[in-house]
Image (tube, rainbow, N blue to C red):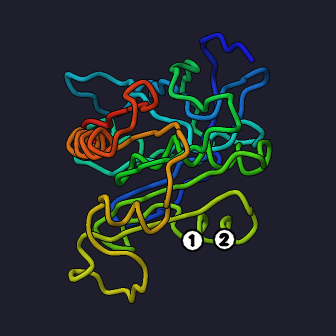
């Protein structure tokens, strides 16, 4: 499918907190809007009540699957003019949407497993990819390693846990790096994603395609780990999330 970036108008349908300091925004899907899992859009506020030097437009990965009726974006709440206005948007408020953009999308060869490494809000494009592949490409082996400080900050944690039960080609491995500061019980993995953790879930890599998304620091650490593990750099795709 070829996608062409264009401009649309859409309205906010629903918003909800989906983790500590994180809000999910559900927008109407404009007629004719098509995208590939993993792509992003530019969202522009119309006549915002306040602005700053960065302007009224921000880029967001689409966290919804390409077949869903709504468009979902998630973002950490920060004390900026854009985020304050976005967080306080009344339901049915209209915004401008431009896109889709980006080539951070799933590979086509089903014989190559897809291994996702997400840090924090970097989960957004992988949400779209996993939802799409689990339903439309059941022959794809999918592994999602997801690093957060604690369960309270892990966006879509329960949704991925439920999806793992339904999708036989999907394995979900969340890990918490600051569980000592959490008020929730946790029996899963703890600590940073490293070779030892990979070896427990990936006894052999079988020439995978690896996808990295998160803060620049997280992406750099995962890139270094994969290079040390002998993964070909051409089989690693990266997207850094700055300012979230």
For mark 1, give the secondary structure. Answer: helix
- Mark 2 touches mark 1? (CB < 8 Å): yes
- Dividing the picture into quarters, in which one does residue 59 lie? top left
For mark 2, give the secondary structure. Answer: helix
In the image, 69: left or right of 95? right
Q: Residue placed at 48% from the left, 27% from the top?
A: 43
Residue 84 appears in the rendering: no
Residue located beneath label 2 in the image: 162
Q: Between residues 12 and 193, which one lies in front from this camera angle?
A: 193
Q: CA distance from mark 2 to mark 1?
A: 6 Å
Please tell me how crowded label 2 is: few (under 14), some (14-19), or many (20+) other residues with Cα within 10 Å: few
Q: Between residues 110 and 79, which one lies in front from this camera angle?
A: 110
Q: Between residues 142 and 199, which one lies in front from this camera angle?
A: 199
Vertical order, 114 against 96 (above or below): below
Q: Residue placed at 32% from the left, 37% from the top?
A: 241
Q: Position of residue 40 (x, y in %)?
A: 52, 28
Q: Residue placed at 29% from the left, 41% from the top?
A: 219
Vertical order, 120 against 86 (above or below): below
- Dividing the picture into quarters, in which one does residue 51 lie? top left
Q: Position of residue 140 (x, y in %)?
A: 70, 45
Please tell me how crowded label 1 is: few (under 14), some (14-19), or many (20+) other residues with Cα within 10 Å: few
Which label belongs to residue 158?
1
């Amino acid at each position: 499918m070829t996608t062409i970036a264009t401009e649309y108008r859409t309205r906010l349908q629903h918003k909800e907190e989906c983790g500590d300091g994180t809000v999910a925004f559900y927008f109407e899907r404009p007629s004719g809007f098509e995208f590939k899992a993993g792509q992003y859009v530019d969202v522009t506020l119309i006549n915002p009540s306040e602005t700053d030097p960065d302007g009224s437009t921000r880029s967001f990965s689409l966290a919804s699957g390409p077949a869903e009726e709504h468009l979902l974006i998630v973002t950490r709440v920060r004390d900026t003019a854009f985020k304050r206005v976005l967080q306080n948007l009344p339901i049915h408020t209209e915004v401008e949407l431009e896109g889709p953009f980006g080539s951070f999308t799933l590979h086509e060869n089903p014989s190559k497993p897809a291994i996702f490494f997400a840090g924090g809000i970097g989960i957004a494009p992988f949400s779209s990819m996993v939802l799409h592949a689990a339903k439309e490409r059941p022959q794809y082996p999918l592994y999602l390693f997801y690093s957060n400080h604690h369960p309270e900050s892990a966006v879509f944690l329960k949704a991925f846990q439920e999806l793992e039960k339904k999708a036989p080609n999907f394995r979900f491995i969340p890990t918490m790096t600051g569980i000592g500061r959490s008020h929730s019980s946790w029996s899963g993995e703890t600590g940073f994603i490293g070779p030892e953790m990979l070896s427990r879930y990936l006894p052999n890599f079988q020439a995978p395609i690896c996808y990295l998304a998160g803060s620049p620091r997280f992406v750099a650490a995962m890139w270094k780990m994969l290079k040390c593990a002998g993964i070909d750099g051409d089989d690693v795709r990266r997207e850094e999330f700055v300012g979230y």
